[in-house]
Image (cartoon, rainbow, N blue to C red):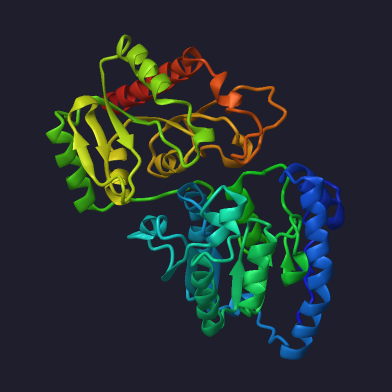
Amino acid sequence: MPLIPTIRPKSSGALSPGEANAAARAALVKMSARKSRMIRVIEAALRPLVHIADCVRGNSEKHDSEADKILVMEYWNLGDVVMLTPFLRSLRIQYPHASVTVVTSPKAAPLFENQGLVDRILTVRIPWAQHYSRWRKYNPFSLHWVELLRMVKTLRDQHFDLAFTARSDMRENFILWVAGVTRRVGYGFGGGGFLLTDLAIPDLHHPHMASRWLRLLEHVGGAALEHLPRLQVTAAEEQSALEILDRHGVSGGELLIGVHPGARSKARQWGEENFSALIAGLEAQFPLQTVWFQEYSPKNPPAEQCERRSLTLPLRQFMAVLSRCKLLICNDSGPMHIATALGVPVVAVFGPTEPAWFGPLGEGNRVVSQPGFWCRPCFDYCIFDQPYCLRMIPVEDVLQACVQAIARVTTRNEVKVGS
């Protein structure tokens, strides 16, 4: 018999599960009326087909504590994977004998190296996660669809007992259903809840993406034993970072500030000229050295430029050099989350996204944003000719946040030396 979706009434405040999901649709997604109608139509068409298919193939119930094979879906971007790490570490403790597989993007796969978080990594370029253009996302002639179908077949062949997805995306819920995972845990407020066996209720008091992941573990009776992202680099990578910095004349005793002016979307980029003016203001107040990180890609190969200490490094080398910095100044981006996971405080400039959902986690981090924009979050689909939510942030505001962050860093260093 098919499993009946389980809803544990651990909702926000005194709301019922249905009310909590309705509130989550209002608070955690920004969905147009047209998209909402489209999802309802797709659900109405899929629901009877899914019910019939479930009755035909059946499902063998297995208690969650007996799960041998666990699947985790997070195929988006670097920052999304970093926010997943507290969940994975807690999952490891909850299921010490289970084999954990993660589905992720090729560019994010190196984040899992030497972390002990998962047993197997499946890389895939999901079509709708590659582009901002809606046509390119769903271009039926894209080879990414072939890649996706191969990945789904691989998942079906593995016969997973338990799977987690935290995005409340009907497409991800559908993938887990097609893959035949016995127990599928996720959210339904974004659509496609009937494709899951377990519907978790989001905690609206803790809307951060990392908290949404941990909520899933609580739903199956686990505990959120880690709440902050954590990554580590190897001793060899640390040595390589020291050699790179030494070639640029940076010694270990100097106040090294990292600057990363890039982001995957232009709508999140504050502007390199603003970062340049910012660093000029900081250098007038502090004896510091800076290293500028540039985006790495196959078209932008590894490089070291002595002027302005500009580095273009593969992900693992970038992590190692970043770990030597005392502060990272950046946009809302993957490097922001990587820095926090390495214990490097950040000053992050936020524009079109919501800091309460995707902001840096941990102490000593600062977010600079311009309030009052009704269109936030737009998820990088800016409806104006340019992202004014970013353009309206003055250099002086970010400079003030950096001065406060540097003062905190230097004070902490003095306390460590004194103790």
In the image: residue 255, left or right of residue 99: left
Of residue 144 and residue 115, the one placed in the foreground of this image is 144
Residue at 47%, 65% in the rendered image: 124
Residue at 72%, 46% in the rendered image: 29
Residue at 45%, 43% in the rendered image: 334
Q: Is residue 148 above or below residue 22?
A: below
**Residue 25 visible in the current orientation:** yes
Total marks in image = 0
In the image: residue 146, left or right of residue 188: left
Image x and y of residue 148, in percent: 53, 70
Image x and y of residue 332, in percent: 50, 35
Q: Quadrant of the C terminus?
A: top left
Q: Quadrant of residue 312?
A: top left
**Residue 221 visible in the current orientation:** no
Q: Is residue 3 above or below residue 203?
A: below
> Seen from this angle, which residue lies furthest bottom?
56
Residue at 33%, 10% in the rendered image: 285
Q: Is residue 280 above or below residue 113?
A: above
Q: Quadrant of residue 307?
A: top left
Of residue 396 and residue 131, the one placed in the foreground of this image is 131
Q: Is residue 7 above or below residue 12?
A: below
Q: Quadrant of the N terminus?
A: bottom right
Image x and y of residue 397, in percent: 51, 15
> Seen from this angle, which residue lies furthest top?
284
Q: Quadrant of residue 385?
A: top right
Image x and y of residue 363, in percent: 48, 33
